Image: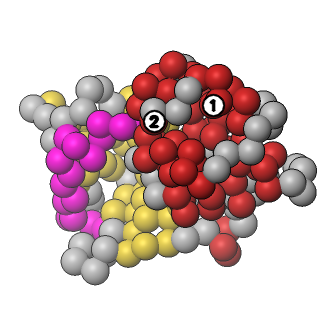
Amino acid sequence: MSDNPSDAISASLKKERIARGWSLADLSERSGVSKAMISKIERNEASPTATVLGKLSGAFGLALSALLALAERQGERISRHGAQPVWQDPESGYLRRMLSPADHGVLELLEIELPANVRVSYPATAFVFQHQQILVTHGTLVFQEGATAHRLETGDCLQLGPPADCSFFNPGKQACRYLLALVRR
């Protein structure tokens, strides 16, 4: 990785655009920044102004600080177990561990531990911007996707369909563990 911050910003912008499946024209239309300027920035032939970065971050739906943080974390390709962020839902006891490195690559990998007899529900809007697969690594998970219930046992992997209201339910007597792989749409 280069020590030049402009190189990291250029690479982060291009990576974010490609991860979303956007062409230069798509980003130009969404941001109000010309295709030529975006192309020059991505090739590191021009340094973006704060105003241009603001327009680009707005098009991505990211705060400018978040866009710059992506550039600062560029190159972090390993996520050590002891440094992985873990969040616990105070109501259900649900544990969520972020396994992926902090560079916000195209793929996000999460490990979930769902306590026995616990259900966690999400609205369809939580899935609009991502494709997901679920891999059960221990126990049983009943995944309700709209009107369809999927019973998943250890080793089963499910690719989610179009966004729908859904719930994750552990009908067992012990915690269920599963991996979620998310890719931005």
Residue 69, percent from left and from top: 62, 61
Q: Nearer the viewer, residue 146 or 28?
A: 28
Q: Quadrant of residue 87?
A: bottom left
* Visual colour scheme: secondary structure
Toward the bottom, the furthest residue is 90
Mark 1 — residue? 38
The residue located at (28%, 80%) in the rendering is: 90
Secondary structure under badge 1? Answer: helix
Q: Quadrant of residue 11?
A: top right
Q: Which residues are magenta?
A: 115-130
Query: What residue sits 71% from the left and 36% below the top?
Result: 41
Q: Which residue is mark 2?
A: 31
Real-space Cα separation, disc 1 to disc 2, in angstroms: 10 Å
User: Which quarter of the rendering shows the C terminus?
Assistant: top left
Residue 181 seen in the current view: no
- The residue lying at 26 percent from left, 26 percent from top is 162
